[in-house]
Image (cartoon, rainbow, N blue to C red):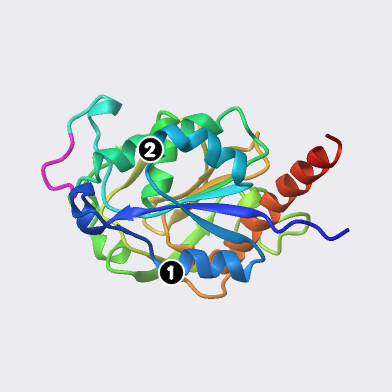
């Protein structure tokens, strides 16, 4: 019997960052990378009440990039220079993250804003405006390619067994952000940029719960770009196989 292809739920953004636009949007790179990795991409509208159903249907999730979190629910004011994400999107994605907490078998990858929401949910602190604290913030902006330093080579982000990457190695990635995490909260720091900006976090107690500040869907075939989404789909495939086996026993 052939294995089921894993279904990967991909969160959507709002056109012009507002639900008032009446239009969802999503970069095609996410679904293309998932399909290339052998998964079935499914786009998820911002329906909080459907979160349990989305989780039932999907074996893994990508929390996509976007603009900036609204910080009041995390105990601080939103910087006046922030480009605030739509309230409905933030409520939906945080509800999804919360509902996934007791389900370690579900593979989760947070990208840019997605990583920030995962880490804020885990008690991390956000640097709301990198130009205030970095000499060269442009390294992280406008889809620039830069180096990432691996801190924890044993993370699920880098693959199984002999990961072909060590603590002294680095890879280049594509970034586009004006904010970044200042602390990882309850998550583990796994990668930084050369200027020490946090680039990657994970939960080592789960098979695949990874957040990255860069955009793997824009980075090409590298280990930390298409390779990262390949590993997400591989992790989700194990969940898909378990779900299929459970269904056949009914």
The magenta stretch is: 78-83
Q: Which residue sits at x=58%, y=53%?
A: 8
Q: Can residue 126 be spotted in the picture?
A: yes
In this orientation, does residue 223 appear?
Answer: no
Quick one: SS at disc 1?
helix
Task: Give the residue number, with chain letter if any, for mark 2.
Answer: 92
Q: Earlier in the sequence, mark 2 or mark 1?
A: 1
Query: Please, what secondary structure does the residue beneath circle 2 have?
Result: helix
Would residue 66 appear left or right of 229 to someone viewing this image? Answer: left
- Residue 137 x %, y %: 25, 60
Q: Quadrant of residue 228?
A: bottom right
Instruction: Residue at 51%, 65% (x, y): give it.
Output: 31
The N terminus appears in which quarter of the rendering?
bottom right
The image position of residue 234, as x and y in percent, is: 70, 56
Instruction: Give the label on residue 28, or none.
Output: 1
Q: Is residue 80 magenta?
A: yes
């Amino acid at each position: 019997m052939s294995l089921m292809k894993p279904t990967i739920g991909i969160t959507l953004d709002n056109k012009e960052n507002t639900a008032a636009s009446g239009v969802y949007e999503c970069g095609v790179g996410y679904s293309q990378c998932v399909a290339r990795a052998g998964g079935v991409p499914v786009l998820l509208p911002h329906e909080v009440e459907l979160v349990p159903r989305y989780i039932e249907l999907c074996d893994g999730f990508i929390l996509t990039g976007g603009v900036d979190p609204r910080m009041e629910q995390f105990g601080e004011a939103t910087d006046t220079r922030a480009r605030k994400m739509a309230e409905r999107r933030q409520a939906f994605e945080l509800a999804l993250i919360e509902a996934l907490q007791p389900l370690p078998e579900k593979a989760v990858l947070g990208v840019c804003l997605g990583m920030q929401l995962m880490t804020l949910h885990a008690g991390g602190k956000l640097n709301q405006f990198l130009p205030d604290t970095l000499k060269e913030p442009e390294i992280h902006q406008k889809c620039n390619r830069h180096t990432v330093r691996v801190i924890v080579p044993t993370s699920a982000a880098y693959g199984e067994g002999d990961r072909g990457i060590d603590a002294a190695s680095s890879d280049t990635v594509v970034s586009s952000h004006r904010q970044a995490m200042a602390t990882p909260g309850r998550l583990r720091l796994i990668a930084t940029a050369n200027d020490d900006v946090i680039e990657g976090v994970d939960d080592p107690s789960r098979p695949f719960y990874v957040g990255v500040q860069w955009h793997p869907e824009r980075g090409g075939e590298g280990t930390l770009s298409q390779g990262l989404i390949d590993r997400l789909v591989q992790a989700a495939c194990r969940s898909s196989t378990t779900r299929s086996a459970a269904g056949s026993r009914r």
